[in-house]
Image (cartoon, grey):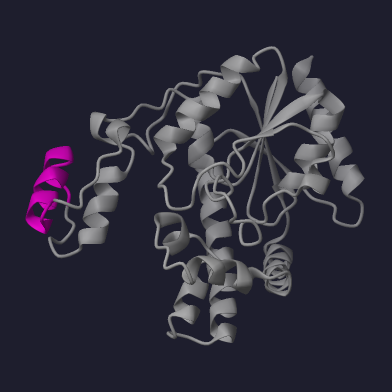
Amino acid sequence: MILCIVGPTGVGKTRMSIELAKKYDAIIINCDAMQVYKDLNIGTAKVTEEEKEGVEHYLFDFVDPKINYTVFDYQKDARKLLEKYKDRNIIFVGGTGLYLKAALFDYRFSLEEKKNESYDHLSNEELLKKCLEKDKNCSIHVNNRKRLIRFLERENIENAPLKPLYNALYIGLTTERKKLYEIINRRVEKMVQNGLAEEVKSFHDKNLHSKALETGIGYKELYKYFDGLCTLEEAIVEIQKNSRHYAKRQYTFFNHQLPVRWFHVNYENFDLTVEEVENYIEVKKN
């Protein structure tokens, strides 16, 4: 049995995955694009050893932050685990829907994407030419180098309907938007109290600049602070705002691209939500 626990940031996915893993004697596979990186702990809300409660966890905390870990890399690693543990119950947990889509569906990559090609040696004009070869309707301006590279790196069939390769149940956790935003705002404040700024400073002091650190929410904003481009208070507000916007994008992806069954979380009695999810799983199993 394969279960996928999805939903917006901060909603309670980790807790749910642990409870279900204990009940079904399952392993847990991460599907959060930031939690694959070593030492990015506080800003990614990475599961702690205590929280794991002895459950086996995979694809967490194993990639050097200087390395750009791609969707193609994730697909290979996740499918190795799916094959290795095909006789076990498996739970995917995380908010990166594209990782799930790549792992569990007939998601294919271009040759360039498989090579994880570097474009540093190409001029903007050469980048634009490659973009037009990939899609003749590409309208990105030749001076927008960052977008040109992102377009070349983007998976060709990201939004195409795909055939599932594995039978899986997609369980989404949700709550009212106002409640979720309150949770997100408090969560960021707690991260700061727990040492988020110090965590980011340890990378900034080493002059590390990578995709994970320059695009990850909680890291890119504090890099601006340490570069003297904003105050700490402004950085924190920006982290909260970007986290809320990210949650909206997560809902959009899950609602349009995965067959998710949504459950409203009872934060007063989380066990009731766990019970509701377990009842749904038992019905689907039988």
Viewed as shown, does residue 22 lie left or right of 91? right
Magenta: predominant secondary structure element?
Answer: helix
Q: Which residues are magenta?
A: 122-138
Does residue 156 belong to the magenta stretch?
no
Residue with the most extreme front position: 206
Viewed as shown, does residue 174 lie left or right of 22? left
Residue 238, given in percent of the width and then of the height, sits at: 53, 76
Residue shown at 53% from the left, 59% from the top: 246
Quadrant showing the N terminus:
top right
Viewed as shown, does residue 125 lie left or right of 223? left
Quadrant showing the C terminus:
top right
Query: Can you say whether 246 is above or below 110 in the image?
Result: below
Observer-nearest residue: 62 or 8?
A: 62
Residue 159, given in percent of the width and then of the height, sits at: 38, 38
Residue 103, given in percent of the width and then of the height, sits at: 50, 28
Residue 257 visible in rendering: no
Observer-nearest residue: 161 or 60?
A: 60
Residue 213, given in percent of the width and then of the height, sits at: 46, 61
Residue shown at 12% from the left, 57% from the top: 124
Residue shown at 58% from the left, 79% from the top: 237
Observer-nearest residue: 194 or 17?
A: 194
Does residue 137 belong to the magenta stretch?
yes
How many numbered circles are shown? 0
Residue shown at 54% from the left, 28% from the top: 78
Observer-nearest residue: 242 or 163?
A: 242
Viewed as shown, does residue 114 lie left or right of 227? left
Query: Can you say whether 149 is above or below 224 in the image?
Result: above
Residue 180 visible in rendering: yes
Query: Can you say whether 218 is above or below 129 in the image?
Result: below
